[in-house]
Amino acid sequence: MTQPIIHKPTVEPSYTTLKRSFQSGKKAEQFRDYQAEARASVKELYRLNHANQTVDFVLAKKKQYASKSSLEMGIWEAIELLSSFVDDSDPDTELPQIEHNLQTAEAIRKDGHPRWFILTGFIHDLGKILGFLGEPQWAVVGDTFPVGCAFSDQNVYSELFAANPDSQNPRYQSKNGIYTEGCGLDQVHFSWGHDEYLYQVVRDYLPEESLYMIRYHSCYVMHQQRQYEHLMNAHDKEMFQWVRAFNPYDLYSKSDERPSVAALRPFYEELIAEFFPEKLRW
Ligand SMILES: [Fe+2]
């Protein structure tokens, strides 16, 4: 696999992302600002998320979705399904999802990245169709984090973990918890949401770099705060440079300027057909 060529892994926004955030009328530090006038629904979502994302809950959801539902759908159909979804956990945008997907993908395309990277930007949030499969928002969106080991205080609203039954379970509260040092992230269970769900749906079709981006893009506590690195193996550490390369596009391309879905559709339909079969099981 090739190495990322444009974005060095960094927590600092690059020039292009700063420029983009300027164009969107927001300063870089104004994104993901959970203290400011974030919608009240954001905190409420994290209250429910942190109280209910236990090891038992995560294992039950993984089992439930492992067999995949009877739903068969193409990628574009899933994109259209998502177009009516607004993410309650996101303080930065109230645009419909399809427009966020296009903003992300178009920013990647403008920077000259490979086609699989553009496609990743376009589909990375498709797992949010979980919201239409009956899951509450707290089990679909928001930052993700490992369960089964001590909750890091670097998680967003970490004080809300006090209501999580796992914080009373000594087995889950040591540094490594139920895992071993350096075991690799494939062994680690993360809070259930759209990242893991979409990873399971698309894992046979995309390059590994793309799968890392999809599976861990919401785990800010890991890719930005650099917590839980003791659970990673050497390969995870190397692949996380791709997760970090992806993040600025997800974050700083959010603006209220609306991309034209109709004009962009032919390009993205062709891109989808290059990697995916006509129908996938969800
Ligand atoms: Fe996402």
Image (cartoon, helix red, strand yellow):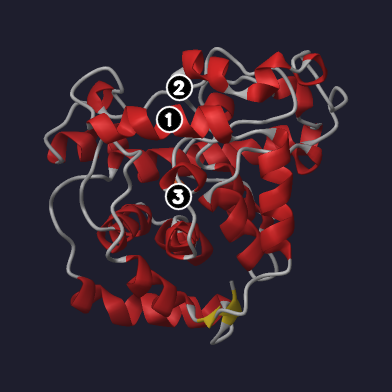
Q: Nearer the viewer, residue 67 or 34?
A: 67
Please say if 110 is above or below 236.
below
In the rendered image, residue 262, in percent from the top left (x then y), is placed at 20, 78
The residue that appears at 31% across and 56% down in the rendered structure is: 110
Q: Disc 1 vs disc 3: Cβ atoms closer than 8 Å?
A: no
Instruction: Please tell me which of labels 2 and 3 falls first in the chain.
Output: 3
Q: Which residue is mark 1?
A: 46
Q: Which quarter shows the N terminus? A: bottom right
Q: Residue 156 — which label?
A: 2
Estimate the x, y position of residue 40 in percent, counting from the top left: 24, 30
On the image, numbered disc 3 is attached to which residue? 136
Residue at disc 1, secondary structure: helix
Q: Is residue 35 above or below residue 138?
A: above
- Amino acid under label 2? Val
Side of 230 where 183 appears, left or right: right
Using the rendered view, name the quadrant where residue 30 is placed: top left
How far across and how far down the image is residue 179, in percent?
84, 28
Q: Nearer the viewer, residue 20 or 85?
A: 85
Q: Secondary structure at mark 2?
A: loop
- Mark positioned earlier in the residue sequence (1 or 3): 1
Using the rendered image of the protein, determine whether residue 9 is visible from the camera's viewpoint: no
* Whole-number angstrom distance, CA of label 2 to CA of label 3: 19 Å
Assess disc 1: are there few (<14), some (14-19) or many (≥20) residues with their C-alpha within 10 Å of its C-alpha. Answer: many
Helix, strand or loop under label 3: loop
Structural distance between the alpha carbons of marks 1 and 3: 12 Å
Badge 3 amino acid: Pro
Q: Is residue 116 above or below residue 80?
A: above
Residue 234 position in % (x across, y down): 79, 32
Side of 112 where 185 appears, left or right: right
**Disc 2 to disc 1: CB gap under 8 Å:** yes
